[in-house]
Image (tube, grey):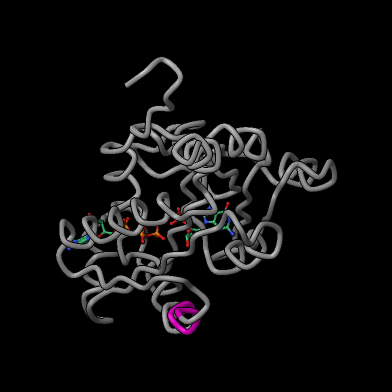
Amino acid sequence: MTDSTISHDKLARRGLLFILSSPSGAGKTTISRMLLGADEEIKLSVSATTRPPRAGEIDGVHYYFVDDAEFDRMVEEDDFYEWAPVFGHRYGTPKGRIRGALKEGQDFLFDIDWQGTQQLYQKDQQDVVRVFILPPSIAELERRLRSRGTDADDVIAARMERARAEISHWDAYDYVVINENVNACFAKVREILDAERMKRQRQTGLIPFVRELMN
Ligand SMILES: Nc1ncnc2c1ncn2[C@@H]1O[C@H](COP(=O)(O)OP(=O)(O)OP(=O)(O)O)[C@@H](O)[C@H]1O
Ligand SMILES: Nc1nc2c(ncn2[C@@H]2O[C@H](COP(=O)(O)O)[C@@H](O)[C@H]2O)c(=O)[nH]1
């Protein structure tokens, strides 16, 4: 390899907005955490929420926990890419510096619902990749919500009540993965991410690389 040759190991590419959605309890947070632990090139988009923290959740890591007044202020100041009411609380994606970072090749992971997915997709179709996680059955979905041990019975009942309505949005996603075995599901989600990174349009370094090949 001469000095002037462009290395193909790490061609420049544009980042992507990788969305995981599912009915509550299907496992998207579990898969998100596995992905963040295994892949240094993707960063969680930390949402703001008016929901109170669950045991073990850390402000600024899992969510920015804000009160209603703070959320109102963020809406008024146009701080959100998208926001939506979910299960009686409000959740939103802060703009942060996502746009600039995308150009530098940073990928972002979003654990958001179908309403937020629609809004992000309308704003930025070329960068968004939408993945929907389905549970293997409704009974297993309820078992998972109970086994998580983080929500009271009435909260679980409300989430189960909404599950069918959420599942009805499955066909607005690019990929659908059934989470029966968590490792198998994680492997499929990783394959999707890897393949999406390889898309020609995202590989901005290809143009100079090919130009040099042809010269
Ligand atoms: N394939 C699986 N098999 C068995 N249990 C699983 C599987 N995937 C996730 N779980 C468990 O199910 C529970 C719910 O998972 P998780 O919190 O990831 O769901 P979620 O879709 O993010 O829910 P929410 O939208 O409410 O945040 C957790 O206790 C998790 O450990
Ligand atoms: N539209 C958005 N939805 C979001 C966002 N952050 C999380 N969520 C979704 O809310 C429900 C409930 O989450 P939980 O942590 O209370 O169980 C779940 O479907 C999340 O995906 C957001 O910023 N925007």
The residue drawn where x is 52% and y is 77% is 172
Main SS, magenta region, reads helix
Report the side of 156 relative to 16 (left or right): left
Q: Position of residue 19 (x, y in %)?
A: 48, 57
Report the residue at 56% width, 44% height from top.
Answer: 47
> In the current view of this chain or complex, which residue is farthest to the front?
215
Taking 90 as reference, is 130 above or below it? below
Q: Residue at x 71, y 58 (%)?
A: 123
Q: In the picture shown, does residue 149 fall above or below 6?
A: below
The picture quadrant where one finds residue 71 is top right
Image coordinates for residue 5, horizontal then vertical, percent: 42, 24
Q: Quadrant of the N terminus?
A: top left
Tally of numbered discs: 0
Front residue of this view, candidates 110 and 162? 110
Q: Which residues are magenta?
A: 166-170
Looking at the image, in which quadrant does ligand 1 appear?
bottom left
